[in-house]
Image (cartoon, helix red, strand yellow):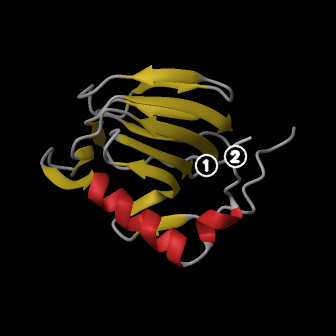
Amino acid sequence: MSKFNDSNIAWRTLDWLPNVSFFVYDVDEKAGVVDVIFKFAANKQVMLHIHHAPYITLVVQGELRFQNPDGSPKEIRPCGSYVKGVVNGVAHTEGGAGDEDAIVFFSNRAVTGNLYEFIDENGKQFKMLGIADFREQLEAEIAAGELKRVSARAA
């Protein structure tokens, strides 16, 4: 089985959000677009959350598994899955399956503020991640020369 080669991606993490790393490719406030790739740890789930912007996903490696808030299985997206997600859907967790991390490209659309709302074990809002947070990460990637390693000019 061949895997997605992520050796040029400088994966970033957030201290409070285990089991997932990410890399921001683009933030365009005017167009309301945030393009980011996530690596979900194998056999782990990311914190319960809700999407506050419509999005498109493409699973480029592994299998992405979703769970309902009660931990019951919700959905499985195999490698190659392309899905258009809705804004303010049902809260869920997601993560990689088996022994392989799941790598998923997200193109968030019509973003005006917050993208993700994270919910704690008591069902209360824990943290919001918005367009400004992803802009900050992108600027850090640019400053470190990390974005340049994965960027090319349009043909």
Question: Whole-Å distance between the Cαs marked 1 and 2?
Answer: 5 Å
Is 4 or 102 nearer to us in this picture? Answer: 4
Residue at screen point 45% across, 63% down: 138
Residue type indicated by callout 2: Glu
Crowding near the residue tagged with mark 1, few <14, some 14–19, many ≥20 C-alpha atoms within 10 Å: many
Instruction: Write down the residue under mark 1.
Output: 42
Which of the 4 image quarters holds residue 80? top right
Residue 100: give its label. 2
Q: Is residue 149 above or below residue 33?
A: below
Label 1 amino acid? Ala
- Of marks 1 and 2, which one's residue comes earlier in the chain? 1
Q: Quadrant of residue 63?
A: top right
Label 2: element kind: loop
In which quadrant is the N terminus drawn?
top right
Q: Give the left or right position of residue 95, taking residue 55 as reference.
A: right
- Residue visible at 80% across and 44% down? 3
Image location (x, y in percent) of residue 18: 43, 61
Which of the two residues, 140 or 74, is positioned nearer the viewer here?
Answer: 140
Q: Where's residue 21, x and y in %?
A: 51, 59
Q: Secondary structure at mark 1?
A: loop
> Is residue 40 positioned above or below 57 on the image?
below
Residue in the image at 48% along x and 51% along y: 26
